[in-house]
């Protein structure tokens, strides 16, 4: 605007100098107020036209047809559709009306001045000629002002500025996607520690929404804001739940390590088998699926139950060790190994022996670890020794 005013002032000064050279300075000075009013009316008309066009950009979704929006997964990029904007920014009608209003205002003002006799005897020309000169000066200044303003280009600049502002606002909202990146990385870290394939995909829904609604976002970002907030809340909940699950699972594994040492020291196959059963439960796909399905309560219930069972095994192992530390005769040791009392009948001893021998036969441990195989062999030898010992002293 400042450049336009400076340009008009420069043109006026040059015209005054030119008219002064031809002895028409007084006519020019009389014409200046009319020129000022007509130029103001012309510019006001163009301004109202521009304001109307800008209003339509937001109110009728016109901007979405004028600019091409592209989404790269994190923010929007845009370019003007030249064919569309050229069509929308046509200002021929506005230019015509602005010239018409400007010239009409000149005619009305100069006629008033003319009727008051202001053009009488101001030059060597007649009054009518002076009026025509005044008209000519005013029309030239109005046309120069319109040419300088360039309504179509000015409107393009306004559309460019408006589009940049709107897309920038949308990108400000989309910056919160970075929060999702951070949350997803945290979730993946916990899932890796738990050795579970946890579904982590909060950005895709937002990206699909933006891709399918990027034009509508230029007029309303309410739904986008709601979607981003909803996904961030979901991600925060999953991260918190996974962290709790991970802490519980780590505590269970730590307890298992302690119990494994205690139980293996006893050499008791029943305890070892129970312990291995608990481990299988902790490593099972069924347990992991509870995390994948976000069944947090069920996961906690199962792990807590396993921990209670591990604690029970630990107490039994400690008790077993305490009993093993007492001095025992071979007979007492044999009864303890077969887990029977001296009152057990010979027939019951035979049956218990067969069951134990069948259960703890080394062939049953073929698919287990080498440590378990060794324990099975040792246990099987103990059972055979105990049975043969009791068979010898009881003569059955």
Image (cartoon, rainbow, N blue to C red):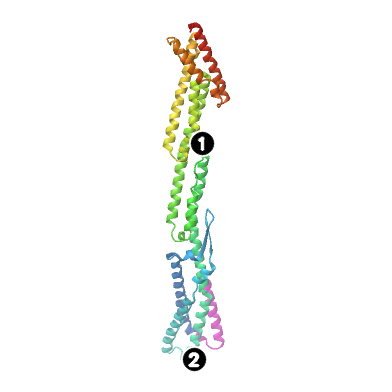
Mark 2 falls on what kind of element?
helix
Q: Does the magenta stretch include residue 348?
A: no
Secondary element under disc 1, as helix, strand or loop, is: helix
Please name whichever residue, 144 or 11, is drawn nearer the observer in this view of the structure.
144
* Magenta stretch, residue numbers: 1-28
Confirm or deny contact between disc 1 and disc 2 (CB under 8 A): no
Q: In this view, does 389 lie above or below 366?
A: above
Q: Mark 2 points at which residue?
A: 129
Give the residue drawn at x 44%, y 13%. Answer: 348
Residue 178 is situated, as x and y percent measured from the top left of the image, at: 51, 49
State the image coordinates of residue 78 (x, y, percent, origin top left): 53, 61
Q: Identify the residue at horizontal 52%, vertical 43% (top origin).
A: 185
Characterize the local packing of mark 1: few (<14), some (14-19) or many (20 or more) Cα atoms within 10 angstroms: many
Q: Residue at 56%, 81% (x, y): give it.
A: 14
Is the residue 210 above or below the residue 119 in the image? Answer: above
User: Considering only vertical position in the picture, is 294 above or below 230?
Assistant: above
**Of residues 1 and 343, which is closer to you in this image?**
343
Near-viewer residue (166 or 180): 180
Residue 1 visible in the current orientation: no
Give whichever of discs 1 and 2 has the lower sequence position: 2
Q: Distance between the residues labelled 1 and 2?
A: 98 Å
Which residue in the structure is indicated by mark 1?
A: 194
Please say whether residue 17 is visible from this viewpoint.
yes
Of labels 1 and 2, the one closer to you? 1
Chief secondary structure of the magenta span?
helix
In the displayed orientation, state which residue is furthest to the right.
Answer: 370
């Amino acid at each position: 605007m400042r450049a336009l005013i400076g340009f008009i002032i420069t043109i006026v000064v040059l015209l005054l100098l030119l008219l002064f050279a031809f002895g028409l300075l007084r006519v020019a000075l009389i014409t200046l107020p009319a020129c000022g009013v007509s130029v103001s009316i012309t510019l006001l008309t163009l301004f109202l036209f521009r304001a109307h066009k800008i209003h339509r950009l937001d109110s009728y979704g016109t901007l979405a047809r004028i600019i091409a929006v592209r989404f790269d997964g994190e923010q929007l990029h845009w370019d003007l559709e030249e064919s569309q904007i050229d069509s929308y920014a046509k200002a021929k009608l506005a230019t015509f009306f602005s010239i018409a209003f400007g010239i009409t205002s000149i005619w009305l003002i100069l006629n008033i001045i003319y009727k008051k006799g202001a053009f009488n005897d101001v030059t060597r020309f007649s009054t009518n000629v002076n009026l025509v000169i005044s008209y000519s000066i005013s029309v030239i200044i109005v046309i120069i002002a319109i040419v300088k303003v360039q309504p179509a280009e000015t409107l393009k600049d306004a559309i460019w500025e408006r589009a940049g502002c709107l897309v920038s606002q949308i990108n400000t909202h989309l910056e919160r996607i970075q929060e999702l990146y951070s949350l997803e990385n945290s979730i993946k870290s916990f899932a890796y520690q738990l050795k579970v394939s946890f579904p982590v995909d909060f950005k895709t829904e937002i990206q699909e929404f933006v891709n399918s609604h990027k034009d509508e976002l230029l007029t309303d970002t309410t739904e986008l804001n709601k979607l981003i907030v909803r996904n961030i809340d979901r991600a925060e909940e999953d991260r918190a739940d996974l962290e709790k699950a991970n802490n519980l699972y780590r505590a269970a594994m730590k307890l298992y390590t302690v119990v494994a040492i205690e139980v293996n020291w006893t050499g008791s196959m029943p305890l070892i088998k129970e312990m291995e059963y608990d481990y299988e439960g902790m490593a099972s796909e069924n347990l992991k699926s509870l995390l994948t399905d976000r069944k947090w309560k069920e996961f906690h219930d199962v792990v807590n139950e396993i921990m209670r069972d591990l604690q029970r095994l630990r107490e039994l192992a400690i008790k077993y060790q305490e009993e093993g530390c007492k001095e025992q005769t071979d007979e007492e040791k044999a009864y303890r190994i077969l887990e029977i009392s001296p009152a057990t009948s010979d027939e019951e001893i035979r049956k218990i022996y067969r069951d134990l021998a069948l259960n703890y036969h080394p062939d049953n441990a073929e698919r287990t670890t080498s440590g378990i195989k060794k324990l099975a062999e040792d246990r099987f030898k103990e059972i055979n020794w105990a049975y043969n010992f009791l068979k010898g002293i009881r003569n059955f």
